Image (cartoon, rainbow, N blue to C red):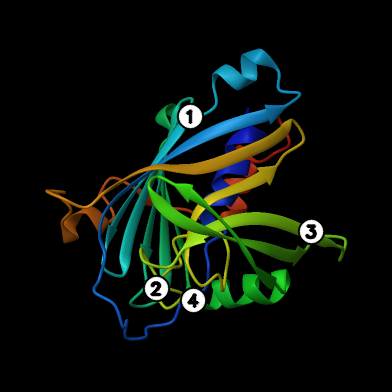
Amino acid sequence: MKRLFFYFFICAISSTLVFSQKSKTKEFKGIVKYSISYDGNWDPTILAQQPKSMELKILGKKSLTEMILPGVTLKTINNGKDSSQIVLIDAGSYGKFYLKVTKEKFIEKMKEASPTINYLDETKQIAGMVAHKAEYIVKDEYGEDKTYVVYYNESIAGPEYNFLNNFPGLKGFPMEYTYETEEGKVTFTVTEIITKKVKIKETDFLIPSDFKQISEDELKQMFGGGEE
């Protein structure tokens, strides 16, 4: 279970690189809801404990993602103004922690991934919006190409402040994408986009005072030790 938690944690911090640029479009304010589906040889007991949804709040160049795991609430605060990220981990009896990821760290991850993006003509409707298909190709730990299929939409956010997704350099907002784990595939799909009468404020993006800063290595030791 610890290993599965750390997988979702890695998904949260695999965010795209962003620089402070002026957007040509009106800043987006809204809530994006994802469903999370699973395919493959999942143990029923483990599968029953996996998150089935994820919510994303967006206010201009800032975003807040929340995912609830067994015994852990994981929140990710992204700030496109300074290309920084805060990951909040409320781990119950383990404690409350936050991890800060800097712009320099994003640049390092970008170089390691060396992404190649192929934009295709295929489209499909997702949550009432047209989503365009792309192949996102990165190098794995063995230096071999690994291809992800992602559907994106450019009207929600653009590359200049769209670092709330897991695909650095993608020119639009990810509407659907799939990851592979040892157990099988995990697919994230947008189910709803709410823009009317949403209550999102600047204070939603602050670090709570009762959270303690932790390093990525410390977090790996705590949650990623290869345990089930």
Res. 90 in view: no
- Extreme residue in the bottom direction: 22
Secondary structure beneath dot 4 equals: helix
Where is residue 143 drawn, in percent x and y? 86, 66
Looking at the image, is mark 4 or mark 1 earlier in the sequence?
1
Res. 22 in view: yes
Judging by the rendered image, the residue that carries numbered circle 2 is: 161
Could you give the CA–CA distance between mark 4 and mark 3, rounded to whole angstroms?
24 Å
Q: Quadrant of the C terminus?
A: top right
Q: Nearer the viewer, mark 4 or mark 1?
A: 1
Judging by the rendered image, the residue that carries numbered circle 1 is: 52
Q: Looking at the picture, which amino acid does disc 4 mark?
A: Lys
Where is residue 160 drawn, in percent x and y? 42, 78
Residue drawn at x 63%, y 34% as measured from the top left: 4
Disc ID at residue 146: 3
Judging by the rendered image, the residue that carries numbered circle 4 is: 103
Q: Quadrant of the N terminus?
A: top right
Looking at the image, is mark 2 or mark 3 earlier in the sequence?
3
Secondary structure beneath dot 3 equals: strand
Where is residue 73 drawn, in percent x and y? 40, 36
Mark 1 Cα within 10 Å, few/some/many (few <14, many 20+)?
A: some
Mark 3 Cα within 10 Å, few/some/many (few <14, many 20+)?
A: few
